[in-house]
Image (cartoon, rainbow, N blue to C red):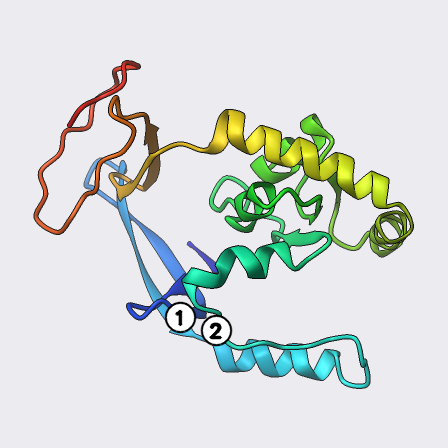
Amino acid sequence: PGRYEARLPRPDGTLVHGACVATALFDDRGARVGSVGVWTDITSRRRAEAEQLARGFTNVRFLGYQPYETLGHSLAAADVHLISLRVGLDGLLVPSKLYGALATARPVMFVGPSQCEAARVISENNLGWQGRPGDAEGLARAIETAATSPAWCAERGRRARALFEAELDRPTTILFDLQGPKLRVGKIGGGSVMVETGSRFILDRSSEPGDE
């Protein structure tokens, strides 16, 4: 059982902030066989809370939905990307914002559990700063460093892009639910395959590039 929040796309591409209350399902032997949850759209509530916190600041702007076609420009507009993850969600969620930041060659500042994937990637590759929730002083020092040292940002941005090209630019990702969420990432021999509604494909454990 648990509750977590995430940003999810609508069919038209716009993002909504949702809250999910979920519980696990077990068979007669006590083995977990899946989960069931209820999503609630809390976009308006979260925006109102953010606007209230930013009231009085002249350097904070809230923008509406940005088209997918201009996503690269939106991501590249930032000097530094800030990512957060609530304690307790490590192992359940990986902030997808991380990969957009790396692709646009920007340093990353992460606030969240030190044992999660985002923190590991940032720390091992020296891509910015990562700290625990509540470490306001540490985050402030990191932001000051980024603001006063263009070379610091440029070097970490270069590392971010190099990591993305070397390890993260994979052509196929499939997410499905089989006794709980599982992620499968594999390479296609021909580079990429477009999967459309009704397409048939095969999943296996082979390390060789596939062709179907």
Secondary structure state at the residue bearing disc 2:
loop
State the CA–CA distance, disc 1 to disc 2.
Answer: 6 Å
Secondary structure state at the residue bearing disc 1:
loop
At 25% from the left edge and 21% from the top edge, which residue is drawn?
189
- Amino acid at the residue labelled 2: Tyr
Q: Quadrant of residue 79?
A: bottom right
Q: Position of residue 141 (x, y in %)?
A: 90, 50
Q: Which residue is mark 1?
A: 14
Q: Quadrant of the C terminus?
A: top left
At 49% from the left edge and 76% from the top edge, which residue is drawn?
43
Q: Position of residue 115 (x, y in %)?
A: 63, 34
Q: Give the answer, above or below, for where 49 lies relative to 116.
A: below
The answer to whether residue 193 is left or right of residue 123 is left
Q: Which residue is mark 2?
A: 65
The answer to whether residue 154 is left or right of residue 124 is right
Q: Position of residue 69 (x, y in %)?
A: 42, 61
At 31% from the left edge and 71% from the top edge, which residue is drawn?
12
At 13% from the left edge and 34% from the top edge, which residue is drawn?
201
The answer to whether residue 86 is left or right of residue 31 is right
Q: Give the answer, above or below, for where 163 lies relative to 149.
A: above
- Amino acid at the residue labelled 1: Thr
Contact, mark 1 vs mark 2 (Cβ under 8 Å): yes
Numbered mark located on residue 136 in the image: none
Q: Quadrant of residue 62?
A: bottom right
Mark 2 closeness class: few <14, some 14–19, many ≥20 residues within 10 Å: few
Closest to the observer, 98 or 27: 98
Q: Give the answer, above or below, for where 125 lies relative to 105.
A: above
